[in-house]
Amino acid sequence: MNDLLKYYFKENKILFVGPLPPPIGGVSIHLSRITNSLEQNGFDVSVFNTSKNYLISYIKLLLLLLKILLNNYDIVHIHSTRKNIIKTVLFAKNIKIFKLYFTDHNPRLFSTSKNNKEFYLKFFTKIDLLIAVSNEVINNYIKEGLTLPDKYLIQNAFFPPDLKKEKCIYNNYDKIIKQFIKNSSPLLVASAYKLSFINNTDLYGLDLCIELTKNLLIKYKYTNVGFIFALPDTSENPNKLKKYYKHIQESISNHFIIITQPIELWPLIKRATIFIRPTITDGDSLSIREALMFGKPVIASDSCARPESVILFKNRDVEDLTYKTIQTLKDIKYERDI
């Protein structure tokens, strides 16, 4: 059981505020698993799902406010950095008495919201417990001159999947995905919540994964290589995604697929030869810990501290990524198909 559970008490009535699947992402999966774990251990838990869409955005905020005001929650735990969500919870806190918990899942709070820095600085003065998923998150706060709450902890976000559901999840995969897995040797896997860019650089490294596959196929003659990239939310940067699709079609069409269905990824990771995490910045990657749990080699960028057994490559260096992949295949004595 994750140590995080000891910060709740069974006599508490708890409201989590954050995303639930779909879409499939690190935060939504974490929230789904922690609430399931708490419920299974007899806790009184509710979730306000921030990923649910309404015709009018203010309806969501009104429903959140009413949910807090009409219930006597002991703890409201936010898993979102959206200002309107936080403002609504803080407004409710002026009326109702409850402890406020906040989990920050990545170190990009200020890099993506510089114009809102003062807002977040004030928000942190209201938090009863801050949970950061990695040292990088805390270091980012210190760098920005933020005064940390009196009570905070660093705790990774990993909760293991329910292995009993593997067969059901895998059977629901699309036939194309299952056939691609069967035909791929080696099979590489990576994922992103959505296609995002920071300073015009691909945050999750989909472009690097495409170039890596080209190198393995053309330069190193891994003729049956297959790369699956999970991208459950395609709402952002659609034109850039079209360019990626075109590039794939022109060079590696039978060796690279982008999965846009909201599927649980871990049964796919379990079947991978190597899991790749080429992010330019990161918190604590749930998918990395899933891969390690299944004993899979993981190659990740050196953009942040990684779990001890992760193989690091130079951030944004596709040649080093290729080299580390080739070396890993040799180390695990992977037989190349020619």
Image (cartoon, rainbow, N blue to C red):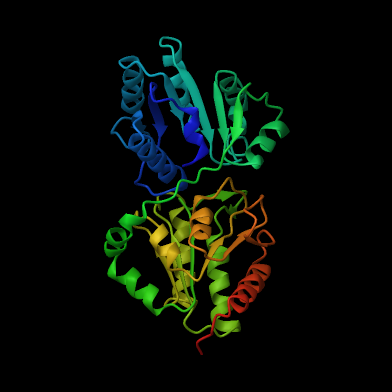
Q: Residue furthest bottom?
A: 338
Q: Position of residue 329 (x, y in %)?
A: 58, 76
Relative height, residue 258 to residue 50 (above, below): below
- Left or right, residue 158 beside residue 281: left
100, 201: nearer the viewer: 100
- Left or right, residue 85 beside residue 263: right
- Left or right, residue 238 beside residue 107: left
Whether residue 184 is visible here, answered yes or no, is yes
Q: Position of residue 229 (x, y in %)?
A: 45, 63
- Left or right, residue 7 beside residue 139: left
Q: Position of residue 147 (x, y in %)?
A: 68, 23
102, 66: nearer the viewer: 102
**Residue sitting at 31 percent across and 71 percent down?**
176
Task: Report how many numbered discs are placed on residues in the image.
Answer: 0
Q: Position of residue 66 (x, y in %)?
A: 31, 18
Q: Residue furthest top?
A: 95
Relative height, residue 206 to residue 285 (above, below): below
